[in-house]
Image (cartoon, grey):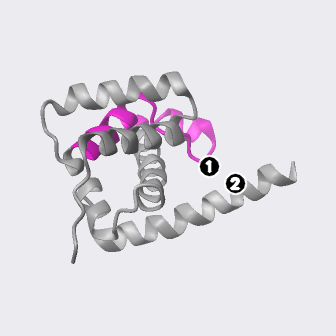
């Protein structure tokens, strides 16, 4: 297997692209990239930077889930609400890591610290969700 080493600039561009897709805002993307690099320290490995990006994103923004659960049910259980936010963010990030960054399932598994089979399921769900979301926006 041929492994292509990315330059630090390529990795920075990649992380900025992920941040923009995750936040949808140029200013928020810049802030997220700064936070990612400040939390990661001097590590220059792509996997470590992407782990730092994931942690920074979830801590700051989380992810609104498209699950239809009554807010009153979630209001009483903060850990459940946070768990759903984390899962939704992980599913979206796994799709972006695959589609934008071109990472293999095993690489995404290392970043997310989840089994490869879980990543494959997340990619399936995430891609279906993005297609349905896009179709709904197009029909509006």
Going by the picture, which residue comes out furthest to the bottom?
1
Whether 58 is drawn above or below 39: the answer is: below
Indicate yes or no whether the magenta region holds residue 103. Answer: no
Give the number of callouts. 2
Can residue 81 be seen here? The reply is no
Residue drawn 13% across the image and 38% down it:
43
SS for dot 1 = loop
Of residue 43 and residue 89, the one placed in the foreground of this image is: 43
Q: Position of residue 108 (x, y in %)?
A: 31, 61
Disc 2, disc 1: CB below 8 Å? yes
Of residue 40 and residue 69, the one placed in the foreground of this image is: 40
Residue drawn 62% across the image and 49% down it:
66
Can residue 104 be seen here? The reply is yes
Residue on which the image places disc 1: 66
Which region shows up in magenta?
49-78
Residue drawn 26% across the image and 45% down it:
51
Residue drawn 36% across the image and 30% down it:
33
Q: Position of residue 118 (x, y in %)?
A: 36, 68
Give the quadrant of the N terminus: bottom left
- Sequence order check, earlier mark of 2 and 1: 1
Residue on which the image places disc 2: 133
SS for dot 2 = helix
């Amino acid at each position: 297997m041929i492994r292509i080493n990315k330059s630090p600039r390529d990795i920075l561009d990649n992380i900025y692209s992920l941040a923009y897709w995750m936040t949808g805002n140029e200013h928020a993307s810049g802030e997220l990239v700064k936070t990612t690099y400040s939390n990661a320290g001097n590590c220059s490995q792509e996997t470590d930077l992407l782990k730092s990006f994931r942690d920074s994103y979830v801590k700051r923004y989380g992810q609104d889930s498209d699950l239809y659960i009554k807010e009153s049910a979630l209001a009483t259980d903060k850990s459940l609400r946070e768990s759903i936010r984390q899962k939704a963010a992980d599913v979206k990030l796994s799709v972006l890591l695959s589609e934008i960054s071109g990472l293999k399932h095993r690489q995404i598994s290392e970043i997310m610290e989840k089994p490869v089979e879980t990543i494959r399921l997340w990619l399936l769900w995430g891609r279906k969700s993005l297609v349905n979301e896009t179709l709904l926006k197009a029909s509006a």
